[in-house]
Amino acid sequence: MKSKMHQVIASKELEDQDTIDYLMEMVEEFMTLEIVREKREKKAPKAPKETVKFAKVSAYNMFKKAKVEGDWKSMTDEQKAEYEMMAAEENGIRREAAIKKAESGEEESSGDESKSRKTSGYHLFLKSKEEGKWSDMSDEEKDVWNSKAAEANKDIVVEKKAKKVDVVYDSYQAALRYLRKKHDGEKFLSWKALGLDAKEQWNEFATTKLSEGMNRDLKRDLIVAAADAVYEQLKA
């Protein structure tokens, strides 16, 4: 295209050389702009960034966590597919938890926990950089520092972390306790050793039939009924 435009301009009977040079410069500039535009259009669009950050797991991570026999490198794609599905499920759970945390306005710890962590007489003594050793001090001398620590701690309220609730895993553990008691001497599969189909079946039961705040007796009755229903499937 560039050469053709040059030929067109050159073929014209233009006596003014300045006009010819000007037209040539315009062609050069136009072509440069066209090249830049084409490069921009061909540039692949960037993949959207993850809106929330969370620690992802891989299929290999899930395989190691399961602690089953075998070597990952020698496994077939079909065998690895089970752990890829488990990893996808776990990452989905972690992503949802990260989204909920972000929506609730919780912030990541800045690393400075001095305002919410209680101290001790020993730590205050070390921080003071006074001469001597704590082990060489008398009980009376230690009591001075312990009193200072008690004074510093009186306004500090340490929040206890809420116990993490996993309705699927916890309900399965309750089912195992029931089955082991009812069928004394028999062995049952742990959650890690449970097959993928059985895990999906129990996951569906726990997430659709159970809830954290439901009546305890009703919850136990539902778990017992589910355990009896899949009794043969859970046997080791």
Image (tube, grey):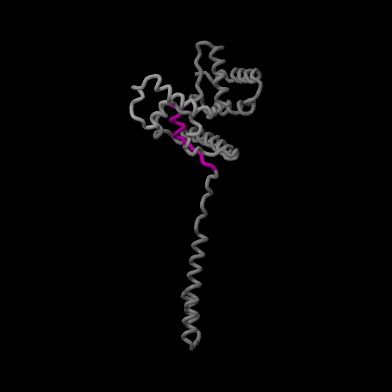
Side of 225 where 133 appears, left or right: left
Is residue 44 in view?
Answer: yes
* Image vertical order of residue 18 relative to residue 232, above or below: below
Place of residue 66 in the rendered image (x, y in percent of width and height, measured from the top left):
46, 28
Side of 215 where 115 appears, left or right: left
Residue at the image point whose x is 47% and y is 77% from the top: 25
Residue at the image point whose x is 59% and y is 37% from the top: 100
The span shown in magenta is 52-67
132 or 119, which lies in front?
132
143 or 231, which lies in front?
143
Residue at the image point whose x is 66% and y is 19% from the top: 218
Place of residue 103 in the rendered image (x, y in percent of width and height, measured from the top left):
60, 40
Place of residue 94 in the rendered image (x, y in percent of width and height, measured from the top left):
53, 35
Place of residue 72 in the rendered image (x, y in percent of width and height, measured from the top left):
41, 33
**Farthest top residue?**
184
What is the tally of numbered marks visible in this picture? 0
Q: Is residue 59 magenta?
A: yes
Q: Is residue 152 magenta?
A: no
* Image vertical order of residue 88 relative to residue 182, above or below: below
136 or 17, which lies in front?
136
Is residue 197 in view?
Answer: no
Residue at the image point whose x is 51% and y is 24% from the top: 191
The part of the image, by quadrant, that contains residue 217 is top right
